[in-house]
Amino acid sequence: MSEIISRRHILELAGAGGLAFAGGFGRAIAQGAKRIEQLDPKLDAILDKSQPVQELATGFGGELGPAEGPVWIKEGGYLLFSDIHTSRRIKYMPGQAGTSVFKEGTNGANGLTRDLQGRLLACEGSGRRITRQELDGSITVIANSFQGKRLNRPNDVVVKSDGSIYFTDPGANNLADQWDLTFGGVYRVSADLGTMTLLFDHFVQPNGLAFSPDESVLYVIDSRRRQIRAFDMMPNGMVAKQTERLFADLGGPEPGGPDGMKVDVAGNIYSGGAGGIYVLDSSGKRLGRIVHGKPATTNIGFGGDDWKTLFFTMRDSLGAVNVKIAGIPVPVPKKQG
C-alpha cells in the first residue's frame, strides 16, 4: 500500500476533526529525524541511545517489492538481503563501499535464513515456494503446496534447533493470478522434509516469526492487525493453540507496522512497528524505538562477528545500529540429545 497521502485526504482528515493538520504535519517532520527513543530505563542495558542510526546502502526495491530478508553469513563476514523488485540477492560487506549483486533470478525471494548445516533457505514470492540452496549450489524445494494446492507467497522463515522449518504464507488475496489456497497460513516442515503441517490459518496477514531463546514460545506477526501474537510450543513441535495471546500491538499514528522480527539471547524482541523498530522485553513491554526516518521497516537480522549489529531493511534501504546483547545466531545452535 502506498504511504503517500494526498493533499485532499489530509484536508478531509483535518476537516473531520480526526487529525489536526499542524499536529499531523509536525509528527511527519519529527518522524524524518533519525534517533533512538528511550521508553523505559531498561533500554540502557540493550543499546546506546546516543549512537547514530546508520544508513548503509540505498536504491533498492520498487513496485514489485522492497528490500527484505537480511541474513548474516558469519564465516564470510558479510550480509545477504533480498531485493524483491529486481529479483536479486544483494551482498553487503562491512568496511566496503556500496553493495554487490550476489545472485540474479531469485524468483522474487523475500525472507531468508539458514538451516543447521548453514544452507540458505529462501521464501520465493513469485516462485510460490520455500527453497534450500545446497552446498553444491543446487536447489531443493522445501515446500510449494499444501494438500495439493499451491502456496500463496511465502514471506518469512525460521529454523528451530531440531532442524524443523517454520514459515508464513500470507493470504491469497495478494496474488495477481489465479490461486488455489483461500487462506494465509503458518506452517511447519519436519527436519527430514517428510511432513508438512498447517499450524494455523486464522491470521489476516501472517508475516515475521521468531522463537524465544529457549524455543518455548513462537512469536508471529499479523501485520494487517498490526500485532505480534504469541503461542506456547508443545514438545512435538506444534503450537498449543489455546495459549494464543496478544504479545504486542505496534500500531500507531506514524507510518509502518509490524514486519520482520528477531530475538536476542536475553529474550528481548525487535520488530518493525509504527514509526520505526521497537525493542520489547519478554513480557511485551516497549523499552525503546529506533526511528530510521523511512516509511516502513521490512525486516531485521542480527550480524557481525559477535552478533551485536542489528541490520534492518526499509523498503529501499539497508540500515544498522549496534546493540549490547547478542542476537540469537543464524544458524541457531543444534539441539543436543
Image (cartoon, rainbow, N blue to C red):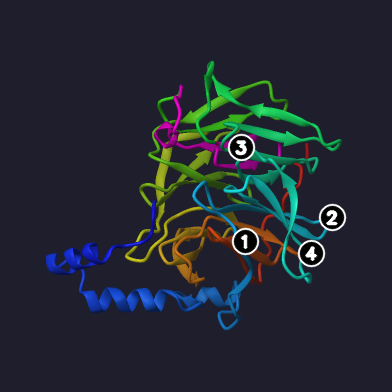
Please say whether residue 245 is visible from this viewpoint: yes
User: Residue 94, image x and y in percent?
Assistant: 76, 68
Q: What residue is drawn where x is 45% and y is 25%?
A: 179
Residue tagged by mark 4?
A: 305
Say which of 162 and 182 sits in front: 182
Mark nearer the N terminus (4 vs 3): 3
Q: Residues within 10 Å of mark 1 (few under 14, many from 20)?
A: some
Whole-percent x, y for residue 91 in the image: 74, 56
Query: Which residue is tagged 3?
Result: 124
Please tell me whether residue 157 belongs to the stretch shown in magenta: yes
Tell me the number on the disc at residue 274. none
**Residue position marked by numbered label 1 in the rendering:** 266
Residue under pointer 2: 75
Q: Residue at x 43, y 34 (%)?
A: 171
x then y, percent, for residue 127: 60, 32
Of label 1 and label 2, which has the lower sequence position?
2
Q: Nearer the viewer, mark 1 or mark 3?
A: 3
Chain-order first, disc 1 or disc 4: 1
Q: Magenta span covers which residues?
A: 154-180
Tell me how far mark 2 sits from mark 4, CA to CA: 9 Å
Magenta segment: does it hold 183? no
The amino acid sitting under disc 1 is Ala
How far apart in space, not on screen, are marks 1 and 2 (Cα)? Answer: 24 Å
Work out whether mark 1 precedes mark 3 in sequence or the reverse, and give the earlier one.
3
